[in-house]
Image: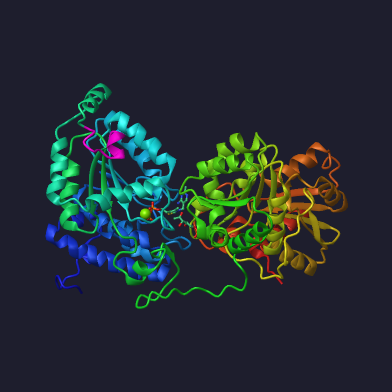
Amino acid sequence: MNAYSKTPLLDTIRTPDDLRKLKVEQVRQVADELRQETIDAVSVTGGHFGAGLGVVELTTAIHYVFDTPRDRLIWDVGHQAYPHKILTGRRDRIRTLRTGGGLSGFTKRSESDYDPFGAAHSSTSISAGLGMAVARDLSGGKNNVIAVIGDGAMSAGMAYEAMNNAGAMNSRLIVILNDNDMSIAPPVGAMSAYLSRLYSGKTYRTLRDVAKQINQRLPKILANRANRVEEYSRGFMMDGGTLFEELGFYYVGPIDGHNLDHLLPVLKNVRDMETGPILLHVVTQKGKGYGPAEASADKYHAVVKFDVATGTQAKSKPNAPAYQNVFGQSLVKEAEKDDKIVAITAAMPSGTGVDIFNKAFPDRTFDVGIAEQHAVTFAAGLATEGYKPFCAIYSTFLQRGYDQIVHDVAIQSLPVRFAIDRAGLVGADGATHAGSFDNAYLGCLPNMVIMAASDEAELVHMVATQVAINDRPSSLRYPRGEGRGIEMPEVGIPLEIGKGRIVRQGSKIALLSFGTRLAECEKAADELAAHGLSTTIADARFMKPLDTELVLKLARDHEILITIEEGSVGGFGSHVAQYLTDQGALDSGLVRFRTMVLPDVFQDHDTPAAMYGRAGLDAKGIVAKVFEALGKDVKAETVKLA
Ligand SMILES: Cc1ncc(C[n+]2csc(CCOP(=O)(O)OP(=O)(O)O)c2C)c(N)n1
Ligand SMILES: CC(=O)[C@@H](O)[C@H](O)COP(=O)(O)O
Ligand SMILES: [Mg+2]
């Protein structure tokens, strides 16, 4: 119960229609109750936290002022959308967030009409919003389109592409820049410094100032570019204008994004401005309203379950090092011997382990912001000058820099080292973050050396291997989470390029693994032994160049040969299949060959183990695949592991 009234108001709100029935003076109480509900829910589920806390007032105000879902509201990244979900008919499921069958941790079209656009990868909201605005104009619609984008997301090139286009098209689009001076880590880049100047120089604009800002621009409708050029020449838009105004936006703000007395009237004014694109700059605090989040360095960007009273997170004691940390530590050791090694991250220092490298070599660490395309070509530039750049980018986010990999790195055979974390299924972040495709999207590129670590010790040796590859690009993939808890090598020893290894010698069945499914292969082999079936297990280590000698030997010496990888069709298994067919190794029918890959669907979030189980890529699935190849029809779920 809060100080305002006996009746909790949030309980009376199922959708924003209910919210909009309340009096404006009740909105504050709704926001306060919404913050408490968000804190309580995330303390149970874990997930993204600080960002949502920072937009409680903004979320409440937007849904109060705008006629959502008729007015389209797009959240950039979508990790801040938990309060939005609570207000838009999903409060009853909010404690299923990021669990199997539960709510997604990001906005998702299939989840609600209030989510007009799915997100999770950043900086897409302005482009999508512009598309919706133009569609509205083409069809004679009258609704508003609002894109809420963070200061971190505003560091990605795509946001500028969209603003560049929006400013020229003069479409009525409302962009709300949620500036909390945080990305996952503190923000980097000139844009971040610029935004700080925007709001530190002027402090917050008073309501009167903002009203003046808005009125000055009404009803200036710059019908087309010619008018705009004329206005420019009259210095109309150059009245000490911001970068956004230079791009053709009406800039409003900065205003305090927690002050509803400012937010509500300004949003009403902005809603009713009949103009081209508007950028409303709101200043908020990530983690606002929860002490432990406000006090923490990362503002509780992402948390596991926690105790509300203390903020203490229920972090499990890992029995093995996290792959990201093994990578960071290995690279430090290599860099101690080689001053040409540099590390690059795209706004993910802690997630990639580059933060470890940064502690040791701050002058050789580069956080380029959310700018994966730039990160890749920046690395290419460094490589042309003899440096050894390790470009550490999650598999899913590396998709953003694909043409740069092809055009700027592979064609020129520049020795950029890609450290690809979050390879395979990642669990709670679901399909948008699954590292499913890098085997396929890199495997088709000439000049690439492509490796996958089967455990944390292999990762150490593969980092050393990448250091030694100076004539072409190389990639090394490894999964989210902890390793196997095995003995770690003191130093990394470069591997022989293109050579795999036999981990267990058997006779009838051969399992050829690329990556960390090797552990499941070992469990499967034990189960098969219980059925009297002898199994060879091989670790391919390299997809390119493929260890063709090993592949042919396995095909020749076994009745069944199965490849397995944490990736989609078109990756390792496809390369082995193509090689075997081209060599005629399958013509005789002596060996029965199967590939095991992720299913050709976007799998919804769950735990990684549950997702791999559904994908058939666990020990049970391997055993079932072997029995299928042997002609014994066994369903994976019926397999009982020893
Ligand atoms: C293309 C891409 N790269 C990296 C990420 C990882 N990521 C998620 S949220 C985030 C920071 C976003 O900062 P901001 O937009 O300011 O939102 P805030 O968390 O501050 O609300 C990053 C880098 C991503 N989602 N998409
Ligand atoms: C929202 C976002 O994209 C990041 O916060 C991402 O969820 C981080 O993933 P990890 O938790 O695997 O580092
Ligand atoms: Mg931010």
Query: Which quadrant is the N terminus positioned in?
Result: bottom left
- Residue at (72, 43) in percent of width and height: 575
Magenta residues, as a range? 237-248
Residue 300: x and y in percent read: 40, 65
SS majority, magenta? loop
Quadrant where the image shows the C terminus? bottom right
In the displayed structure image, the side of residue 395 where residue 177 appears, left or right: left
Report if residue 94 lies within the magenta region.
no
Residue visible at 69% across and 41% down in the picture: 472
Answer with left or right where residue 587 lies relative to residue 4: right
Residue 571 spot, x, y in % from top left: 66, 45
Whether residue 312 is visible here, answered yes or no, is yes
Residue 517 visible here:
no
Task: Inspect the magenta stretch and tell me whether residue 242 lies in it.
Answer: yes
Q: Quadrant of residue 408?
A: top right
On screen, residue 428 above or below 4? above
Residue situated in front as seen by the camera: 303 or 145: 303
Query: For the view shown, which residue lies furthest in the top direction?
Result: 226
Q: Position of residue 256 (x, y in %)?
A: 23, 55
